[in-house]
Image: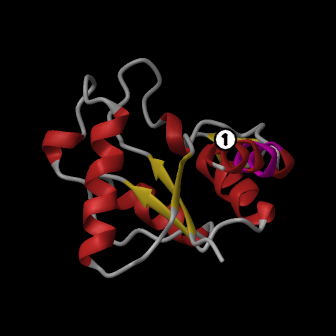
Amino acid sequence: MNKIIAIIPARSGSKRIPNKNIKKFNGRPIIYWTIKSLKRSGLFDHIIVSTNSAKIKKIAQNSGASVLFLRPKKLSGDNVPTILVIKHAINKLEKLNIEFDYVCCAYPCSPLIFPSDINNAFEFIKKKKD
C-alpha cells in the first residue's frame, strides 16, 4: 500500500494580493477549499501545510490539515522556488519519521480543483512509474 502525502506551500506576504491564501472565497478562506478537495479525494495519509504564518497555521488546522513546523524566513520570500519549499518540508517530515512513497504539491489558491482531478492525476503518475 502506498503512503501518499500532500504538501501545501502557503506563505504570508503576497505583494499583489495581500493575505491571498486566507482571503474569503465562497464564505471560507481560500486554502480551506484546497484542503477540502484533498481530503475528499481519499488519497492522502497526511495533508501538510508549509507556512511561515501563525494565522495560516490556525486556519489550515481548523480546515483539517496538519502544520507540523513553521517555514523559515529564508524560504518565505517572493522569489523562493516551490521545489525548495517542498524539499524543506520533506526533510522535516523525514526527521519526524513520517514515511511516504508519493508527495503531491497542491497550491492553496486552487479552490476549484476537484477530488476527481487529484485522483486522476495520481493514477496518471502511477501508470508512468510502472
Could you say whether the residue bearing mark 1 is in a helix, strand or loop?
helix
Question: Residue 113 location, x and y as percent?
Answer: 76, 40
Magenta segment range?
117-122
Q: Amino acid at mark 1?
A: Lys
Question: Residue 87 location, x and y as percent?
Answer: 30, 49
What is the crowding at mark 1: few (fewer than 14 residues within 10 Å), some, or many (at least 20)? Answer: few
Looking at the rendered structure, the number of numbered marks drawn on it comes to: 1
* Most common SS among magenta residues: helix
Residue 86 placement, left or right of 107? left
Q: Residue at x 72, y 65 (%)?
A: 43
Q: Residue at x 25, y 30 (%)?
A: 80
Question: Closer to the camera, 50 or 88?
Answer: 88
Residue 41 placement, left or right of 106? right
Residue 58 placement, left or right of 74? right
- The image quadrant that residue 30 belongs to is top right
Q: Report the residue marked by disc 1.
A: 128
Q: Is residue 4 magenta?
A: no
Question: Residue 84 location, x and y as percent?
Answer: 27, 40
Q: Residue at x 23, y 32 (%)?
A: 77
Question: Residue 40 location, x and y as percent?
Answer: 80, 63
Q: Quadrant of the N terminus?
A: bottom right
Q: Residue furthest right?
A: 116
Residue 30 placement, left or right of 94? right
Question: Closer to the camera, 74 or 87?
Answer: 87
Q: Considering only vertical position in the picture, is 92 above or below 33?
A: below
